[in-house]
Image (tube, rainbow, N blue to C red):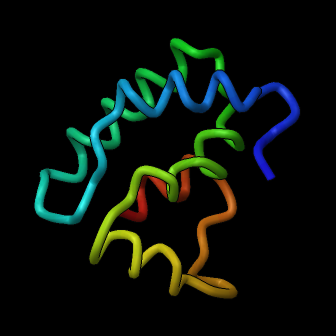
Amino acid sequence: MIGTHTSTTGVMAFMKYVTPYSGKEVPEGWLESYESVAKAEKWSASQMLECVGLKLKKKAKDWFSNLTGEAKPKSWKQFFTFS
């Protein structure tokens, strides 16, 4: 479920500004771009973490989907530094 301050319309508008990440791109550059757009939309760190999976593709999506337990990031900062 997307955070209470993020409308479906807001997510759809956001999604067109961020290219999908498949694992072939430089992760730091993609993460900085994702974070910049999310901050411009006034998303919280928890919203950024909650929605990041929507823009992951192929191997990156598989990797993210398979994170469980202690391996799964609990905060945006942890995810940002983890990748």
Q: Quadrant of residue 58?
A: bottom left
Between residue 34 and residue 71, name the one nearer to us.
34
Could you tell me residue 74's position as x and y percent?
Answer: 68, 63
Direction from residue 62 to residue 42 in the image, left or right: right
Say which residue appears at 65% left-offset and 84% top-offset.
70
Could you tell me residue 61's position as x and y percent?
Answer: 40, 71
Between residue 6 and residue 34, name the one nearer to us.
6
Could you tell me residue 7's position as x and y percent?
Answer: 76, 27
Q: Is residue 65 above or below residue 43?
A: below
Between residue 60 and residue 78, name the one nearer to us.
60
Give the quarter of the figure containing the C terminus. bottom left
In the rendered image, the residue lying farthest to the right is 4
Direction from residue 3 to residue 42 in the image, left or right: left
Q: Is residue 29 above or below residue 69?
A: above
Q: Is residue 9 above or below residue 69?
A: above
Say which residue appears at 66% left-offset and 51% top-offset.
50
Say which residue appears at 67% left-offset and 24% top-offset.
9
Q: Quadrant of residue 82?
A: bottom left
Between residue 14 and residue 70, name the one nearer to us.
14
How many numbered marks have been drawn onto this rendered protein structure? 0
Could you tell me residue 4's position as x and y percent?
Answer: 87, 33
Direction from residue 48 to residue 36 in the image, left or right: left
Say which residue appears at 80% left-offset and 53% top-offset.
1
